[in-house]
Amino acid sequence: MSMANEGHGLLLASMEPPAGLEEEFQDWYDNEHVPERTGIEGVLSGVRLVCVEGWPRYVALYDLKTVSVLDSEGYRAVSGDNFSPWSKRILSKVRGQYRAAGVQVYPGDAVSGRFASMTLLRYRAVDPAREGELIEAALAAAAGRDERQAGTVRVYRVGDHGQTDYLVMIDWSHGPAVAAKVVPPPAFAALLDLVNTYVPYWKHGHLPGVYSKA
């Protein structure tokens, strides 16, 4: 999984609890799961998001110094066979699970900051030779409006099951109404299988979903 001389890594996980598990799901995520991961050496920050347009409803993003953090003893100690009993029980019940580990190919060293909303786009089975073209298209999608509303772009390369996927994240300083107006690049339309709009996850009037070590 390690890729030398590349940018920061990303771990993304999406899921949604079934009816009746919502309150415990939030307690588990806020009080055990995210703090476990943000306590691992090489995990730079973690943020929880809630979907306002799209599915599944919840996403967690972890910025990594490099993607090889996911091969470390610290990460293995709290994942897979070493999940806590609480984690095993919750994860056996949630729906819409998607996990992606990738390398930031643009800009290379950005981490999650404060934003009002975020657009997440996923492209499947992209020819890596078109990576530069995809980055340019993502930048155009973020800039194609009043410059005061321009978004901040991050692009990640994800290797999964023998194919190369790309995740594009556009952070906005404005709310989800702006994020929802993103026009995906037409040149890659056939490869696009997800366009979701997210806002930071809030609870009890503060933002417990942001755990930054910066």
Image (cartoon, helix red, strand yellow):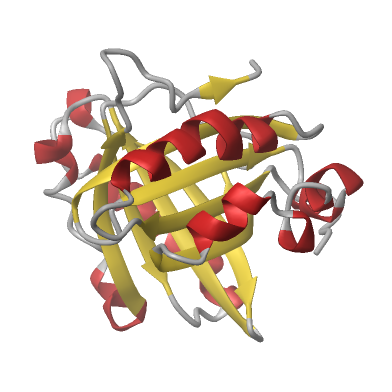
Give x and y (percent) for residue 193. 32, 75
Q: Residue at x 26, y 13 (%)?
A: 205
Q: Residue at x 24, y 62 (%)?
A: 184
Identify the image quadrant of the N terminus: bottom right
| Image quadrant in which you'd find residue 190 | bottom left
Left or right position of 76 against 130: right
Q: Residue at x 30, y 25 (%)?
A: 202
Q: Is residue 124 above or below residue 45?
A: below
Give x and y (percent) for residue 155. 50, 52
Give x and y (percent) for residue 23. 32, 39
Q: Quick check: can you spot residue 131?
A: yes
Please tell me which residue lies in front, 213 or 173.
213
Q: Is residue 205 above or below residue 102?
A: above
Give x and y (percent) for residue 4. 86, 54
Please tell me which residue lies in front, 132 or 73.
73
| Image quadrant in which you'd find residue 55 | bottom left
Q: Quick check: can you spot residue 132?
A: no
Q: Residue at x 16, y 30 (%)?
A: 175
Please tell me which residue lies in front, 116 or 137.
116
| Image quadrant in which you'd find residue 144 | top left
Left or right position of 112 against 42: left
